[in-house]
Image: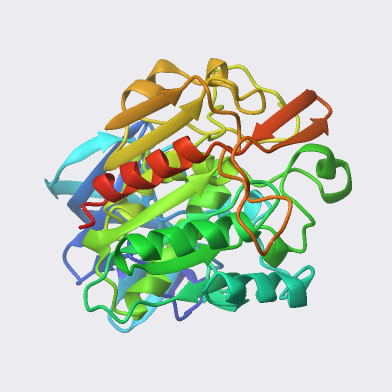
Amino acid sequence: MLKKICALGLFSIISIASSAQDAYDGVYLTIPKVAIANTLYRNVKISVGQVLAVNGGAPSKDYDTYIPATNVLSIPSVAVGSSTYTNVQITVGQVFAVGESGPLSTLGFDDYNFENSVIKSAFIPNEVNLNRSATFWGVGTVAPLVPGFDGKGLLLASWTPSAKPDAPTFVLAHGGGGIDSTLFVLGADLRALGDANILILDSIWSRGRASNGGDSINASGKTLSSNARMFDLVAAGRWLATQGVNPNKTYAIGLSQGGWGVLRAFTNDPVVTELVKPLYAGGASIYPMCEEPGTKHTEEKNFTFHKLGPYHSKVLLITGGLDTLTPISYCSDSTLKSVDKWLHWEDATHSFNQNFPSAFQRSIDGTCQTMVNGFGTHQFCYNEKRVKQMLDEIRIFSSMST
C-alpha cells in the first residue's frame, strides 16, 4: 500500500492521534470503524485493491465510509509504518474479518465546531462578586480550568476537591444564564451530603457569550445545542480523570439547558455512548429542555436539535407541573419514560431551587421571581420541600451514604 501511495505523489505526512485510525501492515488493512449506509461495523480487516487518492488535511470523520456500488472506501486516517496519511480513498480487495455492528451514530466530530462551540474567552462576568459568592458558599472560585473537547482553550470552572479518598464527584451544568449562586449552593449542599468533589462547569462565558438562549440570541447568534453541552461534559470528564477521580462514582447534574445536555450525553447514540460512558456512572436532569427532532419547539430557528433517549447509563429526571418555560408537553415519551427514575412534581415551577434575591443567603420558601421572554411570562418559585427532596433523590441515585 505504501508503494501505491508514494506513486501517487499526493500524500502529506502529519502527526495525528486518532482513536479510530486505520492501520496497514503491508498485507491487511485493519479498520476500527466503518459505515456502510446506516450501519456502523467495527474491527474490520480487508486487503487493499487500488489506491485512488490521498488528499491530506484534517481527518474528515472518525470512521471510514464504504460505498458498495463503487467499491470505494474513504479512510480519514491510516497509519503505514511510522507515517500517517489522511483522507485516503481506496478500492477494497477481499474482506477477511468483521466484528460487531450497530446503527450509525447521528453525531460526527465535525459537529463540535459546527455548533458554535469554539472557546474564545477567559472573561468572567462580574468576577469579583461572583467569586466572593463562591467563597462564601465554600466552593472553588471560577477560573479557566478545563481543556475544551478539541484541546483548544480552557472552559471556565469552579473545582472543589474532597479530602476523602475515592469520594463521589458531581459535575454541575448550568442553565441558560450561566454560573450563579444557585450552582454554588447546590455544590455546597452536595458536599454536605457526603464530602463530594464538585466541578461547576461553564459553557457560555468561555465562548464570549452573555447568555445561552432566549432573547440574547439576536446578539450572539444561534445558541449552543444539547450536543455542545454534551461535548463540554466529555471535556470535564476527561479533565477529572487527570485529577484521579473514580468514573464509576462520577455523576453529571444539569439544570434547565444543562439538563438538556445531560439527556443528550446519556442518550444511547453510538458515538455519544463511546465518549461519555467511560467517564460517568449516570446523570441527573433537573427541569430540562427536552426538545428533539420530531417534538414541538419553542425556538426552532435558534437551536439545533438532537435525539434524546433511550439512555446508555442510568438517568434521574425531575420535572415540574408548574414549569411554563420547559414544559414536559415538549418532551417525547422516549425522553421521559426511558429514564431510570422520573419524578414529576405538580407543585414545582421551573428553577424551583433558584437562589435569589441575594448571592449570599438562601432563598426563602415560597419566594417567587418573574421572567419575561418572547414566549410569555414565567414564574420561578423557590420550593424548599422539593429542594430537599431533590437532594435526597440525588443522594440515593448516586449511592452516597448519609
Q: Which residue is situated farthest in the right direction here?
A: 219
Apparent side of residue 47 relative to residue 323 in the rendered image (left or right): left
The image position of residue 283, as x and y in percent, is 36, 46
In which quadrant of the rendered image does the C terminus lie? Answer: bottom left
Q: Nearer the viewer, residue 401 or 13?
A: 401
Seen at 47% across and 64% down, the residue is: 188
Apparent side of residue 299 relative to residue 102 in the rendered image (left or right): right
The image position of residue 111, as x and y in percent, is 56, 49
Say which quarter of the image contains residue 3.
Answer: bottom left
Say which quarter of the image contains residue 264.
Answer: top left
Seen at 73% across and 27% down, the residue is: 378
Apparent side of residue 80 relative to residue 191 in the rendered image (left or right): left
Apparent side of residue 4 relative to residue 214 in the rendered image (left or right): left
Seen at 57% across and 33% down, the residue is: 289
72 is higher (above) or lower (below) than 198: above
- Does the rendering let one see residue 195? yes
Q: How is the image coloured?
A: rainbow
Say which quarter of the image contains residue 209.
Answer: bottom right
121 is higher (above) or lower (below) than 351: below
- Does the rendering let one see residue 60? no
Seen at 55% across and 72% down, the residue is: 158
The image position of residue 32, as x and y in percent, is 25, 56
The image position of residue 244, as x and y in percent, is 29, 79
11 is higher (above) or lower (below) than 71: below
